[in-house]
Structures are given as C-alpha cells and as structure tokens.
Image (cartoon, rainbow, N blue to C red):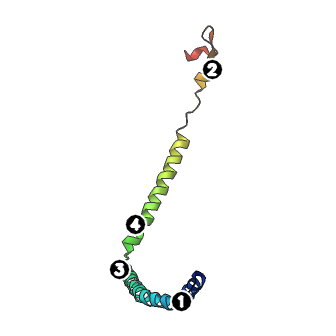
Amino acid sequence: MKMNKEEAISDLLSAVIAILPMGTMFVIQLIIPVMVRTNEKIQAERDAIALMESAQETTFLSRLIPNVLLALCAAFVLNFILILFYSREKKNPDIEMMSGTCSHFEVKKPEIM
C-alpha cells in the first residue's frame, strides 16, 4: 500500500506529537539531579561564608575605629572651614585713604606717608 505525501507528513507529525511529552519528561528527569547537586553546592558555599562571617571577632576596638575616623574627618572639615573664615583679608584703612589713577595720584591722608 502506497502512502501519499500528505498522509506521510500527518503520520510523522502525529508520531512527533505522541513522543514529545515522553521526551520532555526524559530530559527533565536528566536535568533535575544536576540542578539539585548544583543547588546543594551553592547552599554549602553560602553556609560556609555565613559561618566565617559569624566567626569574625567584633571587638570594642574594631567597632571604635570607624567612628574615630569619622570624627577626625569631621574635625578636619570644620577646622578647614574655620581657617577659611578667619583668613580672609581684612581691609586696610591706609589703602582706603589712597586713590587715583596712573596720571594723577592723590593721598587723602598725608600723614600715612
């Protein structure tokens, strides 16, 4: 008995559709153990890191050093602002009493000469 092309294609498609769920289940059964082992390794690494972090000593000095450094930085900034504030040039009254241009210069208060 000869099959035409259309019947052959439809039989092939129905065979693929029938096999597809079984193939998918087979692939999933192969992947699940690999994923479980990978997750176990990752969880073991996370547990080891958490154990190392909890084992680190937190002494009084290790908690004090960052606060001391922050206080020193704040003191440095405050000192810098105060120096800038007080080091501004004060106006000299003698300079204020002299005025003029290059061609004409006049001293308003002659006793400063």
Which residue bears the numbered disc 4? 65
The quarter of the displayed image where residue 72 is located: bottom left
Q: Compare residues 56 and 34 and report the one nearer the observer.
A: 34
Marks 2 and 4 sit apart, C-alpha to C-alpha, by 56 Å
Marks 4 and 1 sit apart, C-alpha to C-alpha, by 73 Å
In the rendered structure, find residue 52 and report the number of the disc placed on it. 3
Who comes first in sequence, dot 2 or dot 1? Answer: 1
Marks 3 and 4 sit apart, C-alpha to C-alpha, by 22 Å
Who comes first in sequence, dot 3 or dot 1? Answer: 1
Query: Which residue corresponds to the image point at 55% horizontal and 33% vertical from the top-left?
Result: 89
Reply above or below: 20 against 59.
below
At label 1, the amino acid type is Ala
Where disc 2 sits, the SS reads: loop
Q: Position of residue 106 (x, y in %)?
A: 63, 11
The quarter of the displayed image where residue 34 is located: bottom left
Q: Residue furthest front?
A: 1
Marks 3 and 1: which is nearer the front? 1
Who comes first in sequence, dot 3 or dot 4? Answer: 3
**Do the residues under discs 4 and 1 have CB atoms within 8 angstroms?**
no
Q: Position of residue 56 (x, y in %)?
A: 35, 78
Where disc 1 sits, the SS reads: helix
Marks 3 and 4: which is nearer the front? 3
**Do the residues under discs 3 and 2 have CB atoms within 8 angstroms?**
no
Which residue bears the numbered disc 1? 15
Which residue bears the numbered disc 2? 97
Crowd class of label 2 (few under 14; some 14 to 19; many from 20; radius 10 Å):
few
